[in-house]
Image (spheres, coloured by chain):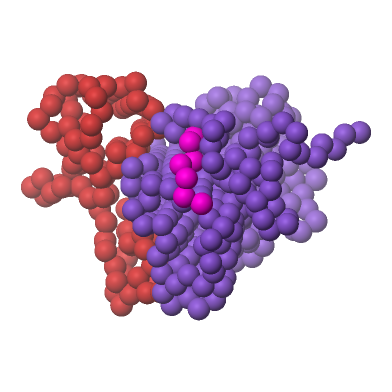
Amino acid sequence: MIEKKNYSGKVSPDVGGETEFTRCNFSQPEPVLDGTNYIGTRLFPGDDTPRYFTRCNLVNCELPPGSTATKCNTTIRRTLVQTGTDEIVINGTALVTPIYHDVIYGRLTGPSVYEYHPSPIEIPNNKVVE
Amino acid sequence: MPTYYVDAATGLDSDTGLTEALAWLTIDKAMNTVAAGDKVWVKGGIDYTELVTIDTLGTNSAGITFEGYTTTPGDGGQFVIDGESTRSMGMSSSVGNGNHFYRFSNMTLENHTGYAFHLDGSDMLYFDNCHFLNNGTGPRGDNDGMFINCTFEGNSSHGTYWDNVKYVNCVSSNNSGDGFYCSYLGQFFNCVSSSNAGRGFYSGNGVISVNNTIDGDSKDTAIGIRSGSALSALIVNTIIYDCETGIENSTANFNCLMLKNNLLNSNTTNYSGVLLDATTTDITAAPEFTDEAGGDYTLATSSAARNAGADASGTSSPGMDIGAHQSQDAGSRVVITG
């Protein structure tokens, strides 16, 4: 079993034949478009050996068939690259343009009720202007 | 200032919450009820699957505390808020800007699609023994955060993103973004950053790093410490190992960068940007961790980082090590007893 490794952004990491992973990060920056749907990026492409993932980050990942994911983050989400001059509009509301925030949530209802956009829009990790 | 109880296994939100037998079911019910000075015990064991919203501010003299336990209040057990890959965040605030004066102890936030914890104008928040695992981003706040004995692990973006913040004895590892991100004044003491894909420590405006360890893990980490913009940077007794770049100071920065008794080893480039301070007290020998692969960053007996740190005298001092862990070599410390 492999524990606490960062394989983020890698689709075929060298795991030495291990099939059990605990608290590892396999997250991919973007999903892939399959027809009209966004699906995860297939991990270990061409290798259908089932794997077992426990408390791993599997954001934007598609697992080999027969794999098991227990208490993992299996979100599929898109990333929007924003520049310092972009304006983001969520549900018709223009949000203040941040220079370096990495996630923006839309405030959808009245002042006493906060709701958040179900799909966070990602802004680059780095500050755009320094 | 009553004490309340929450229990995801047996609680009812229609009860009073005033005893364990009458515990509430949800943490959000407690948030709806508490007032300044109140204490809430949150029982672990079964995960909480809710969005928790802070509705009330504490005060400087009467903060509000949420603390986890497993069997008996005070036993240090964790409670878990699980986003189940569907909820954007675990905890937020409806009171907007203002000094919150909240303390969270023994709490885990995991599997949220966005921020694990997100407050705007989040003044005066204190996290003790809290863990942020496999979220979009770890905790996010704007001001006056304090994290002690916390971990940030496996998040899809930054491990933690908090401005004007202090971290003590914290570990950020295996995140897809920066280990610790601050756009303004990050202060780090006895912390570890390992295998983060971005920067170990990023502070856009001033950084203080004292006795920390940053392991880039075969150059997974782009920059060990990045200091930008206009405030001074102080980096002392810090190990920066196996990164693409060790220390990078903004080219726009004409303020002071003080480097003192750091160890930089196995980085492709040790220093980058404007360096106004001499690096002659830094060393480049191998840090020799006890078990780097296993995440044990204590120092091997032969490590060059032992007894090579600067103390109050400003020079290398027997007994003061470089890095997040002190080896406590025999005979080198003043022991105060009685």
Shade representing chain A: red
Shade representing chain B: purple
Does the stretch in magenta take in B23?
Answer: no
Q: Residue at x 48, y 36 (%)?
A: B288
Residue B304 in percent (x, y) is at 54, 41
Closer to the camera, B21 or B306?
Answer: B306
From the viewer's perspective, is residue B217 above or below residue A16?
Answer: below
Q: Is residue A122 left or right of residue B271?
A: left
Residue A121, image quadrant: bottom left
Q: Residue at x 9, y 30 (%)?
A: A46
Q: Residue at x 29, y 71 (%)?
A: A83
Residue B287 in percent (x, y) is at 49, 41
Closer to the camera, B314 or B274?
Answer: B314
Q: Main secondary structure of the magenta part?
A: loop
Residue B292 visible (yes or no): yes
Closer to the camera, B63 or B185?
Answer: B185
Closer to the camera, A64 or B278?
Answer: B278
From the viewer's perspective, is residue B174 above or below residue B206?
Answer: above
Residue B95, image quadrant: bottom right
Residue B55 in percent (x, y) is at 61, 54
From the viewer's perspective, is residue B224 above or below residue A100?
Answer: above
Q: Which residues are magenta?
A: B283-289
User: Quarter holding the C terminus of chain B?
Assistant: top right
Residue B14 visible (yes or no): no
Q: Is residue B155 left or right of residue B299?
A: left
User: Quarter holding the N terminus of chain B?
Assistant: top right
Residue A39 in percent (x, y) is at 18, 43
